[in-house]
Amino acid sequence: MNTSRTASWVIIGLTLLFLIGPFVVIVLAALTNGNNLAFPPEGLSLRWFIKVFTIESFRDSFVISMVLAVFGTLAALVIGVPAAYAIVRYKVPGAGAVQLIVSSPLIVPGIIVGLALLRYLVIPTGFTIFATLFLAHTALILPYAVRVVTSSMQNLRTDVEEAALILGCSRLGSFFRVVFPNIRGGILAAFILGFVTSFNQVPVSLFLSGPGVRTLPIDMLAYMETTYDPSVAALACLLAVMSVGIVFAAEKFLGFSKYV
Amino acid sequence: MSDFVKLDKLTLAYGDVVAVPDLSFSIGKGELVALLGPSGCGKTTTMRAIAGLMAPKSGSIHIDGRDVTNLAPSKREVGLVFQSYALFPHLSVYENVAFGLKMRKASNIRERVEEAIASVGLSDFTNRLTPDLSGGQQQRVSLARSLVVEPKVLLLDEPLSNLDARLRLEMQLVLKDIQRRTGVTMIFVTHDQSEALALADRIVLMKDGVIVQEGSAEEMYNAPRTRFAADFFGFENIFPGDDGQDRAWRPGAITLGDGPFEGQIRGMSFGGDYRTYVIDTERGQIKGAVRADLPSYKEGDKVRFDLPMAQAVALDAG
């Protein structure tokens, strides 16, 4: 009994170490006073955190990543919510196929998606890199949007909408007055998942980045190739804190984990 | 007056599958009518068509002299109490009941809603979210929500079937009281003959989308005209007579212990006041109910019995 309890604590400890360890290492490395990315840190200071904000390319790529994450996710929801509605409410012919196609960006390796978009969209048609990135991120987030919204919609009975129709709503009115308020949590969960996925996306964006247009993770990779200072670690810390903050707030206010 | 709700040659189909072919019937103002039948008989489909949730393939529906066949549900002035109650889970009792009035931009909303909530005895729950209520309370919210907009016709889908025996009786009284107080025309759908008998002024018995028989509760109970109707209203023993006419007897109409026929007891179920025996006979199984204070039989006993002609109901062929 006692040994099994000890063993389970050991396993829990190792798991936590495995999950949190790298983050702790990065945080400590970022707090260094030295000039190199190293662990353990040489002295403690916040100067690399301050430096991050002075690097112009980080500021630009942060804005690009933000715009992609926010508007890509919104676009995915605009497509995904009606799609989820149709899949749940109507016996759409080939609903299974639709769900599969919608999920395909999850299955096809991102690097191939990126390469394909570059080779067959950007090069032959002259589609701008930014528009292509936007397209790729939207497609990438769509599976999350459809899946999460579908599962929150499944809990809502059809007759609730019919009741709204009889009480005087139009079809569209019943969606906004009855369906939407009940799947709001699911939509927000999808938004957060999509946002985080898009913001942390590397493989798809890799081929679709060039001078002037880079997402933040790609920019961080590029920065590290030339400059091996701790500012990347500091930036990573800030981003991690941002992600945790968003998820924490969502969980606290909306019970986010119900939907995922 | 007797054509307040009028269905004329209504055909309802799901894709190519016709659920209700060519249905016609009329309901008078203020009447409480039961659409009764086994599942799949088309009763719910018919009710949904009246509500406008299903478009008919052909035929027409009139309510209070107005052709509503192609009107949206919201324009028909009907209320529908769903079997699942279909309350809006994100809204309170008050907001659920107020929903229809708000959509109509009615006046005195607060007053009317509070009155409606009080009339179903839920004033103490006005601000509760509906998923926190019991099934019986949810049903009363649903009722208040439908009635507060003063519909011309109130439709109810299996209004008693989710309730336990005590709540059933209570809800029966509530519905009868609503009928008396508001004079609203009510149509309810049920598969349970006892519900129909207890509640309805008139029963419309359906099978395969067709009306088998309609009449008052007493007519239906005492004088079913077909095998199907007889079986549905508890005439469990149906035999062809020597003259070629089918006759039906309730289990209670069978005399056990004496008579021209003989059978063997197959099994018994005790029902309090009565014991019901299943008896194997030359002409098939019969069911006979005998007062529990009379001598009982064991499985395998030979027993004589009679099918008294005076208690028989003669059935139409078919």
Image: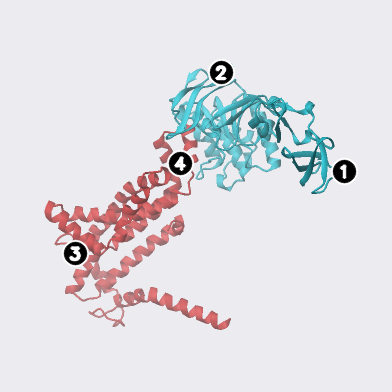
Chain colours: A red, B cyan
Residue at 25% across / 59% down in the picture? Answer: A65
Q: CA distance from mark 1 to mark 2?
A: 54 Å
Residue at 48% across / 49% down in the picture? Answer: A155
| Image mark 1: chain | B
- In the rendered structure, which disc, 1 or 2, sits on the residue that comes first in sequence? 2
Q: Quadrant of the C terminus of chain B?
A: top right
Q: CA distance from mark 3 to mark 2?
A: 78 Å
According to the image, label 1 marks what residue?
Answer: B295
Q: Work out whether disc 3 and disc 2 sit on a shared chain.
A: no
Which is nearer the eye, A65 or B26?
B26
B104 relative position to B84: left or right: left
According to the image, label 3 marks what residue?
Answer: A57
From the image, state whether disc 1 or disc 2 is nearer to you.
1
According to the image, label 4 marks what residue?
Answer: A178
Give the image quarter of residue B302.
top right
Q: Work out whether disc 1 and disc 3 sit on a shared chain.
A: no
Callout 4: SS? helix
Q: CA distance from mark 1 to mark 4?
A: 62 Å
Up-down: is A38 above or below A173?
A: below
According to the image, label 2 marks what residue?
Answer: B3
Q: Work out whether disc 1 and disc 4 sit on a shared chain.
A: no
Which is nearer the eye, A14 or B305?
B305
